[in-house]
Amino acid sequence: MSNLNQLLHPKALRYVAAVAQLGSVQAAARDVSISASAIDRHILLLEEDLGLPLFERQPRGMRLTAAGELLLALSQRWKADLNRTLSDIKQLQGVSQGHLRLAAMDSHVNGLLPEFVLAVAQEHPGIVLEVDIVSPDEAMQRLRAGDVDLAVAFNLKPGRDLHIVATADLPLGCVVAPGHPLSSLAQVTFKDVAAWPLAAQSKALTIRRYLERRHNWLLQEARPPLVTNSLQLVKSLVRSGSHVALTSELDAGPEILAGQLCFVPLKDKSAQAQTVGVAVSAGRALPHIARMVAERLGTHVIEYLARVRAVGADTNRKKSKPRRDAK
């Protein structure tokens, strides 16, 4: 931790966080370079003033009580606010430095995120970018709570406390291996999909909840041999040719670009499109650099999706191109 962080982050909160993280006063003392007796004294004074213990003293270490959990959360919020303030000060100096936290989805990990992280590193080398992989619901909770600075997530809903920087529609489709019989079709129906083993995503994911709400018959009729919250496992099975999956172009983006998977649109009028968007909190004053990075991420999402769709369109043109009979 820098000298400025040490000066501006209250000592008592830092000590509580260190003991909670490392499990003992002695380990915390080594981490913050202060005597164990000084840390113990600060914690005892806090407990005396609050009238509640912050830790359970156990033979194998220190464990936070409910009151201790509240102070740890306060320490984390203080540190996050401090990092944002220091970033603002750097901006006043004309220096693109700072610490930004991004909430993203698991499906972005091997798709649009690596390129974006590299772009930020090249364009703003002074920025420390911390990426948390969470669910769509958790992304919004963290953004509203101020635990992250920006989020890229599915099905964002704008509100007074949420500003959508960029958004794009994600039509639902069937993802198959290039040699699969469905890959030769320009469009498929849910009945077409139900004829094949389906790798279904778990209820924790938005697509599965939508299918249960609107097309539960499909999940029952297809009798999926696999239900998982791992998109990577789903795509691995689909690449093998043994299964098909219902998802978006963005979820299968890396494999579509590499020619390993095909995205076949659903022609059912009842198929509801998802959205992907980039959002920041509307109720917080973000550093200028955070707004710049959010806009950069929004542009990157749109451009990445356009590249994936261009490959898919090229594949569809090849499907529809009439074949010449061999002579």
Image (spheres, rainbow, N blue to C red):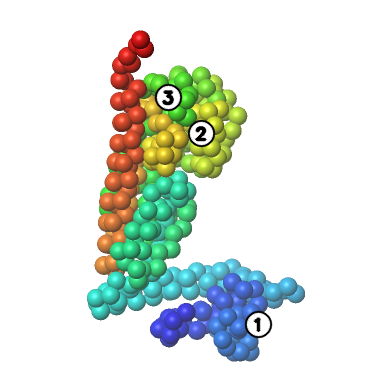
* Label 1 sits on residue: 26
Amino acid type indicated by mark 2: Arg
Of labels 1 and 2, earlier in sequence is 1
Of 98 and 17, nearer the camera is 98
Q: Residue at x 33, y 25 (%)?
A: 318
User: What's the distance in space between the residues labelled 3 and 1, CA to CA?
Assistant: 62 Å
Location of mark 2 (residue) = 239
Callout 3 secondary element: helix
Q: In the figure, residue 307 lies in which quadrant?
A: top left
Residue ID for mark 3: 183
Q: What element carries label 2?
A: helix
* Cα–Cα span, label 2 and label 3: 12 Å
Question: Does the image show residue 157?
Answer: no
The correct choice, above or below, for 204 with respect to 271 in the image is: below
Q: Residue lying furthest right in this view?
A: 59
Height in image: 190 above or below 245?
above
In the displayed structure, does residue 322 sit left or right of residue 189?
left
| Kind of residue at disc 1 | Gln
